[in-house]
Structure formats: C-alpha cells, structure tokens
Image: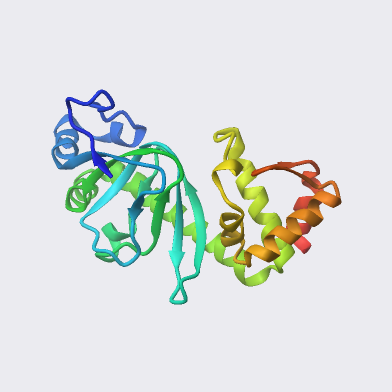
Amino acid sequence: MKTILETDKDFICEINAPCFQLLSNDEIEIVRASKTQVLFRKGDILTKQGAFASYILFVIKGISKQYIEGDDNRTYNLKIIQAGEFVGLSSVFSQNTFNYSSVALTDCQAFLIEKDSISKLISGNGTFGLGIIKRYCGQNANLFSTLRNVLFKQMNGKIAETLLYIDDLKSEISDIFQLLSRKDIADFAGVSVESAVKFLKTLEKENIIKLIEKDIEIIDKHKLEFISKNG
C-alpha cells in the first residue's frame, strides 16, 4: 500500500462519486480532511478479517475480491468489489473490526476515510445516511444470497451459479475470468479446487462453456441456468 500525495500525478483532488454529491460543501470538507488516498498494488490486502477498523474504504479505481477466512485456513469468496463501492461499512454500524478480508485483483486506488467522520455525516445528513444504509442493506442481501447458494445447492449448482455471477460482470470487467484463478472460482462455490476443475471440464465437453486458458466463455447460458437451479 502506498499513500498518494497531492504532488503525485495519480492524485484525485475532487470527490466526484454520486454518493458524495449529497453532501454540503462543509460536509465535503469533513470528508476531505479525514481521508487519505492510497494505492494498493495487485495482491495487496485492503482489509484483514478481525483487524481493528478505524476507517472505511471507498474504491476509486480497480477491482478487488472480498472473502472470509475459516479456522482451518480455508477461504470463501463473497463478491467482487468494483470502483464506487465502500469496503468496511459494517464497522460503522456494529463493530470495531473488519468481519471479512479483501485483496486487490488489480492495482486499486481508494480513499481511506475515518469511520467517525462517516458516522457524523450519517447522523447529520439524512439523505446521505439513507444512501449509506441502502448500500449496507445491499451488501447484506448479497451475503444472504451467497449463504443460500452454499447451504441449499449441490456442487454442480454451486459452480454453475458462480460462473453465472462472474459472467454477469463481464460487461464492466471484460477480463474478469482472467483475473481469477481456478481456486478463486472454487472458493466462490465453496468446493474443492479438484471438484471445480473436473466439473468445468465436464461443462466444456457438454458444450456449455469453453475454456480458453484462464478465460471462460459461456456458450449455453440456458443450460447453465438450469444446472444452477436444479444441479
């Protein structure tokens, strides 16, 4: 992680994200005074599960992966984090530690914003606060959807659902599959790498997907959706 200074060419001086446009000039100054702009290189940790959280992150550029870590050193991927998203909102509302880890899949730029400043803005600006709460609820909805996938689907359904989720991101991140390893795909589905690789090859033989090195092309989306629902 590298702090980006005002003298650096990559420094972004304005806070232009739509969510911040709901703030008054004085409130914008609160954000500006409490933020630090940083660069995370590919592979850098943005948040560490269980670590003390004195700030939240707002991603300006880049792609990262959110995951939880188990006691047995296993990991489970929750979602892909894109530019324009907050990371660590739960620490504002409920606890003082991060309840998940996240790692940069590409170089990422982010604002680190002091948690107390965000709490102050939520309390003083109802419109901004409602927007933050909606984002937080959206993150919880994603978590419940992920939980349903793990608890109630068989292995084939889990992997098919994972492929559909990642493929939906292709419109905004054309090389998304190339940014993920086969272990990443397995960790999104909650299965072993061996099982994931074996089933991917089965899907290719059945002309449902096409494997092109790390990339994956979905050929028959209807069949994959059927497997996701019934597999």
Residue 179: where, in percent of width, then height?
A: 54, 43
Q: In this view, does 25 lie to the left or right of 230?
A: left
Q: In which quarter of the image is residue 41?
A: top left
User: What residue do we see at 24% from left, 64% from top?
Assistant: 96
Whether residue 188 is visible: yes
Whether residue 226 is visible: no
Please determine whether, in this image, residue 83 is positioned above or below residue 86. Answer: above
User: What residue do we see at 17% from left, 49% from top?
Assistant: 120
- The quadrant the N terminus occupies is top left
Q: Nearer the viewer, residue 12 or 14?
A: 12
Residue found at the very far bottom of the displayed protein: 71
Residue 54: where, in percent of width, then height?
A: 20, 56
Please determine whether, in this image, residue 144 is positioned above or below residue 39. Answer: below
Residue 101: where, in percent of width, then height?
A: 39, 59
Residue 56: where, in percent of width, then height?
A: 28, 50
Q: Is residue 34 left or right of residue 75?
A: left
User: What residue do we see at 67% from left, 49% from top?
Assistant: 164
Total labels: the figure holds 0
Q: Which of 196 and 134 is in front in this view?
A: 196
Q: Quadrant of residue 176?
A: top right
User: What residue do we see at 72% from left, 62% from top?
Assistant: 157
Residue found at the very far right of the displayed protein: 206
- The quadrant the C terminus occupies is bottom right
Please determine whether, in this image, residue 6 is positioned above or below residue 220. Answer: above
Color theme of the render:
rainbow
Q: In this view, does 47 lie to the left or right of 117?
A: right
Please determine whether, in this image, residue 8 is positioned above or below residue 181. Answer: above
Q: Nearer the viewer, residue 84 or 12?
A: 12
Q: Nearer the viewer, residue 101 or 151?
A: 101
